[in-house]
């Protein structure tokens, strides 16, 4: 299908579109009455141009075929609105452009909705994660919790932590090592429990 669209895009546009002739008017009249053969004739006559136009408007050749199909469905449903004052293609052109714009709006709306859903999920995940971390920190002894919070959450250097806790730097290192191991064990256990639920 993409090869067909690519070939269609490479075809030069005619200098001027054909003027409605008696034959086209006859087919349009029959299509207005619901004649499937007449609809097929119009489809064959304008399909390549509609697909090419949709590809240019959307800037996505992979979606052009679907947009063209949607435009033809709209056109055949509202064929009674065509008054024959201008060229049929001009009337069809407006329908194609509207279908493409609607498609782009829908895609943008869906992307925004997906982003909003992702933000809500991230926010929920963030709240859940913070609650989990707080609960796990509560399970550490006060000296281990203090060392871990000062280093990981407050970003203090080892010497600063030693000064705050009034302990040697070596004690800070050993407490941090013990706190990280204990926290990791508690965190992994909590993750396993969540996955088993």
Image: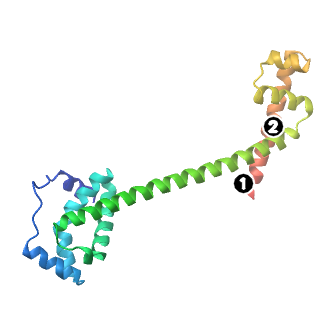
Q: Secondary structure at mark 2?
A: helix
Count every numbered label the image shows and give the total: 2
Q: Earlier in the sequence, mark 1 or mark 2?
A: 2
Q: Position of residue 28 (x, y in %)?
A: 17, 77
**Picture quadrant where residue 83 is located:** bottom left
Counting from the top left corner in percent of width and height, residue 106 is at 44, 59
Q: Is residue 81 left or right of residue 162?
A: left
168 vs 18, nearest the viewer:
18
In this view, the residue in front, 53 or 158, is 53
**Res 195 label:** 1
Residue 90 located left or right of residue 156: left
User: Callout 2 environment at 10 Å: few (<14), some (14 to 19), or many (20+)?
Assistant: some
As helix, strand or loop, the secondary structure at mark 1 comes to helix
- CB contact under 8 Å: marks 1 and 2: no
Type of colouring = rainbow
- Name above or below for residue 138 compared with residue 20: above
Identify the residue at image location x=81%, y=30%.
149
The Cα atoms of the two marked residues, 1 and 2, are separated by 18 Å
Q: Quadrant of residue 134?
A: top right
- In the image, taking residue 97 as reference, residue 128 lies left or right, namely right
- Mark number for residue 183? 2
- Percent coordinates x, y for residue 8 in the rendering: 20, 56
Q: Residue at x 11, y 56 (%)?
A: 14
């Amino acid at each position: 299908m993409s090869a067909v669209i690519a070939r269609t895009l490479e075809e030069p546009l005619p200098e001027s579109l054909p003027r409605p002739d008696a034959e086209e008017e006859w087919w349009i009249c029959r299509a207005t009455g619901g004649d499937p053969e007449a609809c097929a004739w119009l489809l064959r006559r304008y399909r390549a141009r509609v697909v090419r136009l949709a590809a240019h408007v959307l800037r996505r050749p992979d979606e052009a075929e679907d947009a063209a199909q949607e435009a033809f469905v709209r056109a055949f449903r509202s064929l009674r609105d065509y008054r024959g004052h201008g060229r049929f293609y001009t009337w069809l052109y407006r329908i194609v452009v509207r279908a493409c714009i609607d498609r782009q709006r829908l895609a943008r709306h869906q992307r925004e909705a997906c982003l909003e859903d992702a933000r809500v999920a991230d926010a929920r995940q963030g709240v859940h994660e913070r609650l989990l971390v707080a609960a796990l920190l509560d399970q550490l002894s006060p000296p281990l919790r203090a060392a871990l919070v000062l280093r990981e959450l407050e970003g203090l250097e080892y010497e600063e932590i030693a000064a705050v806790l009034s302990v040697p730097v070596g004690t800070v290192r050993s407490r941090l090592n013990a706190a990280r191991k204990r926290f990791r064990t508690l965190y992994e256990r909590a993750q396993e429990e969540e996955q088993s639920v």
